[in-house]
Amino acid sequence: MSCIRFNTPAQRLAMRQAAPSMLTADEARLLAATSHPAPPVTDSKIARLRLLAENENTKIRESVASSYHAPKDVMARLAADPDAGVRGCVARNESTPCDILRSLADDESELVRGWLAVNFSVPADVMHHLEDDPSETVRSLVRWKSELASA
């Protein structure tokens, strides 16, 4: 018996019609957003974020600092956190207010300043300040971002 299979034109057409279609990235995001909407931000969620921002576990505080819904006063407190990882999450969060991002421009941690350099919400004056950063890594991230923006 032969292992070769010969499909008729009708079978080949049926297989093509049954094949899954490939979605573009934008179509996939739209489908995900409409199929799985985010729950509304309630007062209780904000209260939980405030409570979690005080947690002793740095990973939990990092999670709050990454939230797009954290209130401004919570983000300001987390921007002054003793842990560089928490401050880095504040620096890379695109919803962090500009005045808080400005306060991180002279952070002692290269990690924090590096995340600040690649955040597209950082004001232009902060980017100009980071162009002269003592860290070559931060300066190269500023150059990379400006090349990416001009492309």
Image (cartoon, rainbow, N blue to C red):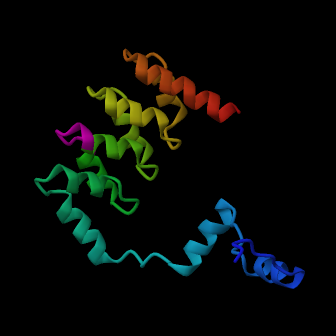
Segment tinted magenta in the rendering: 79-85
Relative image position of residue 115 (x, y in whole percent): 40, 36
- Residue 81 magenta: yes
Q: How many marks?
A: 0
Relative image position of residue 76 (x, y in whole percent): 28, 47
Q: Nearer the viewer, residue 136 or 49?
A: 136
Residue with the most extreme front position: 1
Relative image position of residue 48 (x, y in whole percent): 23, 70
Q: Nearer the viewer, residue 78 or 86?
A: 86
Q: Is residue 25 above or below residue 4?
A: above
- Residue sitting at 46 percent across and 32 percent down? 117
Relative image position of residue 72 (x, y in whole percent): 34, 55
Q: Nearer the viewer, residue 60 or 116?
A: 60
* Residue 113 quadrant: top left
Please say whether residue 147 is visible from this viewpoint. yes
Residue with the most extreme left position: 56
Q: Is residue 132 above or below residue 13?
A: above
- Residue sitting at 70 percent across and 67 percent down? 22
* Residue 105 quadrant: top left
Q: Is residue 32 above or below residue 25?
A: below
Apparent side of residue 110 relative to residue 15 in the rendered image (left or right): left
- Residue sitting at 63 percent across and 28 percent down? 147
Q: Is residue 30 above or below residue 58?
A: below
- Residue 12 magenta: no
Q: Nearer the viewer, residue 133 or 144?
A: 144
Residue with the most extreme right position: 9
